[in-house]
Image (tube, rainbow, N blue to C red):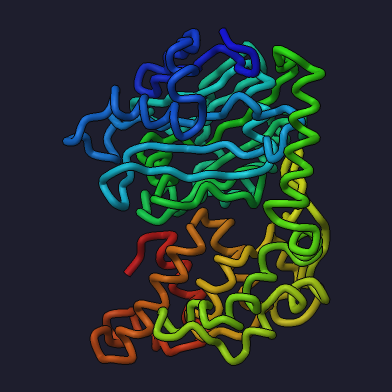
Amino acid sequence: MYKGYAGRILRVDLTSRNVKVEPLPDGLALNYLGGTGFAARILWDEVNAETDPLSPENVLIIATGPVNGTAFPPSGRYMMASKSPLTGIWSESHVGGHLGPELKYAGYDMILVKGRSSEPVYLMIDDDRVEVRDAKNIWGKDTRETVKTLWDELGDRSFKIACIGPAGENMVKISSVISEMGRAAARTGIGAVWGSKRLKAIAVRGSKDIEVADPDGFMQLVKESIRMCTEEFFGKAAQDTLGKYGTPCLVEMLNSIGRLPTKNHWTGVFDKANLIGGEAVRSRYRFAQVPCLACVIQCGYISYIREGRYAGTITKGPEYESIFALGSNCLVSDIEAIIHMNMLCNLYGLDTISTGKTLSWAMECYERGLLTKEDLDGIELRWGDVEAMIKLIEKIARREG
């Protein structure tokens, strides 16, 4: 097996609760490298065009690459793939943080999940010890409560946990998987695939080393990669801006060139962009920096609202995409409301981008008379109406109405 890889695939059949470990084929590593490449090959081989994405026959893939868990930037990212319940075709969603590296430290390059459990379960991975455990006590909980409950049950907060919320359990087609209480594998409805399999969470802890073929040569590549990111790809000014403000700095930048999605994409300019951009977040609500493993930029952060209407709101981000989707695209200029809705989406396990864009589309339909108050269970969905948006976010998560 090539260096850099753990050299093993973890296969889980939730119908039988059978778990087995297979060697990672050399040909797979050589020809498909890792991550998306691995997932594309597996999906091609194991899922056909007629497979229902929410059926037991669909495969859930969690994949890493050869540099995950090393000092190479940004080695914290991993990916999930499946056949999408949203589109019926390829599903791919990437997420940062530390769970991907932890999976490598536990000794696995990929997890492949098939079947459907008769009851809610979660997967516990502790190096070579792998168990499919009962999850009835956490089914129905939001993603934050799920993680806290599992940490108490496992007795160790070093476990890295990815889970679904009520939206995934209800197989909402824009549901996400929340990794480490705020990093989202959000696109293409991957959370619904977890829900269809009755898989609530995966908890991973590992202690193995990752071997590289030439440690000295590898560290030279790491240094060169850092130099290229700093001096060539981003540039020092862009790196400093992203590190200071995170991706919300893109709000005002894109607004200045007419590229900020506004009013369901009717325009690219929002006259209140300064109220929801990087400085608006950083000046009052940025609480802590939470970078991915080995990241040069370190843009990840946590927001916290200390007082007022949304006091107590604490959430990872929001990122630029969440801000435009729940903000300018719905004509919302209240950054606290955006932060709060971002938190709700993370707790329920909803894709903030798809949720926000669904709401902005519905707002335009309401404005044009294509949707009525009766269609929306008595909700008047006008542009910028945060309370109406919150009510609909809750309904989407529970598949009500």
- The outermost residue toward the front is 232
Q: In terms of depth relative to the viewer, which is nearer, 28 or 160? A: 28
**Residue at image point 37% right, 17% down:** 16
Give the residue displayed 64% in from the left and 52% down from the top: 182
Image coordinates of residue 192 in percent, x first then y, are: 39, 46
Q: Residue furthest left?
A: 50
Q: For residue 357, which quarter of the picture?
A: bottom left
Q: Report how many numbered discs are placed on residues in the image.
A: 0
Please tell me which residue lies in front, 136 or 14.
14
Measuring from the top left, give residue 291's x and y in whole percent: 76, 48
Q: What residue is drawn where x is 32% and y is 70%?
A: 401
Q: Pinpoint residue 264: horizontal percent, then vertical percent.
A: 41, 80
The quarter of the picture where the N terminus appears is: top right
**Location of residue 378 with respect to 39 vertically, above or below:** below
* Quadrant in which residue 381 is drawn: bottom left
Q: Residue 64: give x, y in percent of width and height.
A: 56, 29
At horizontal 44% and vertical 17% (from top left) the residue drawn is 28
- Judging depth in this view, the residue of 314 and 250 nearest the camera is 250
